[in-house]
Image: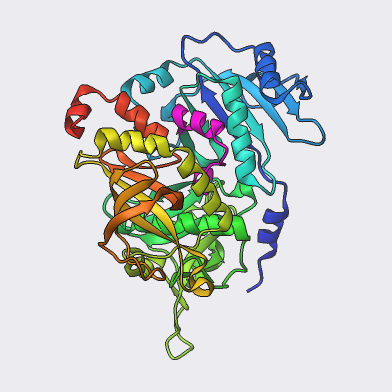
Amino acid sequence: MKLPAHYQAFLDAPRPPSPMWAWLAASEEAPTATAAMSALTARFGAGLTLEMVSPPTAPGATWELTCTLPDGGRRFSVWAQRSEKIEALHLQHDHEVLTPAEREALQKSVWSLGVVLVFGDEPLEDFHFQIRALIAVAPAAVAAFDVAAYRLHHAEWLKESAQSAATPSPTSLFVMHFVSDEGKPGWLHTHGLDRCGRLELELFDITPDASRLLSELVNSTAAFFLEQGLPAPGEAVEVGRDLPLLWLPWEDALSRKKPKFGGGRDDRDQVHGNPTAVLFAPARKVLGFFGSGLSSPASHLPVLQGSPILYVSNSHTRRMELLSRERLPTLKALFGKLGGNEQFKFLVKLGYPTVDPEQYGSREHIWFEVHSFGGEHVDATCINQPHSVPALKEGLRGLHELTLITDWTVFCPVGRFDAERVGLLVHVLDSAPDELRTQLGL
């Protein structure tokens, strides 16, 4: 199937800018352009070119600067504006990590500082730079709002990301909205990918119970498309073992498999009417002729409920490996305090050499539940059935070298926290009110 002309024009058009602003505490004075200039020069060097924009072009800005790194480097803008209230923003669950005091601080915030740039061919690098620039001018930010993704980022996550040698995860570039009437199937779609030169992704008629696992599938698909590029519409690609998917323009999707619960033409407003990619699982036609040839991605739930192999790019694997090792001391410290608390589960992912590299790659990344940490080892039980590591099996406990670590995560009543978000978990636990501390057994 050929890419429709208006889809090609959409992908070839200049990318939309990616603005992000940070709320300042109510006690902070009105920020000045001079102070921002000093902070940016200190962060990026004296070769940074700074120019005032008069009048400001950013909506609601009181002043604006254009900034250009030397030798043809990035060009971005910084501005100050009056703070917006979180009730006016289309937020999802991210704001739930805010403490009552932080919510109050956002409500009382008077000023915000913003950074905007256009992402190029390395959107994760550009996003990482944007976070660093924002923290440079707003080091005491309460939180930040990523406008393109309608997403709130906690200050602790921003600070850790700015300091890390690893770029943020691909999932930090977008957010998923699940739109449904309570208890009914709904429409799952992303926001934030179009600024990366990709189409936003959609799923039709997804039940609330299936939305969590299918969100993981969307995460993997988005990362796959960001890394590999957009396949042709109707072309099946494997985003994991036994997990083929294809996409169709939303107009074709509506004509071939019309949704029953959201995503139809009535929902195609100015934001959701742009070209998007609706995901399906390929299906056989009856007698080779009848039917749409399309199935809901929910048909992959049996695979997703097992121990699926989701394909991850080498660059993403290296990024997570770097991050997991960079923040391993934090994991060990948390385990030292909470390893005996039944409400907290600590998992590590270890990359073991495979016996069949041609089929499974050079390493198989396997999850283990932690029992204790040593200096160079972890005592842990394998919780996945390995595919190409005969020495391991599900349920086998043993000592494993920490040099094999490629990822880790902590499950607890307040959420799931991986190496990228562990600083936020530490902050939540440290600032938890007495009632929550009692509930968590702290």
* Spot occupied by residue 85 in the image (x, y as percentages of width and height): 45, 24
Specify whether residue 169 is in view: no
Of residues 440 and 10, the one nearer the viewer is: 440
Task: Please give the range of residues in magenta.
Answer: 153-174
Splitting the image into 4 quarters, where does residue 230 fall? bottom right
Is 216 in the magenta?
no
Of residues 14 and 380, the one nearer the viewer is: 380
* Spot occupied by residue 275 in the image (x, y as percentages of width and height): 60, 56
Q: Is residue 404 left or right of residue 415?
A: right
Splitting the image into 4 quarters, where does residue 333 fall? top left
Is 158 in the magenta?
yes
Task: Locate the N terminus and report the quarter of the image it occupies.
Answer: bottom right
Name the residue: 31% across, 41% down.
415
* Spot occupied by residue 387 in the image (x, y as percentages of width and height): 39, 70
Specify whether residue 160 is in view: yes
Name the residue: 54% across, 8% down.
29
* Spot occupied by residue 123 in the image (x, y as percentages of width and height): 63, 45
Which residue reaches farthest bottom? 287
Which residue reaches farthest front? 375
Of residues 182 and 197, the one nearer the viewer is: 197
Task: Locate the C terminus and report the quarter of the image it occupies.
Answer: top left
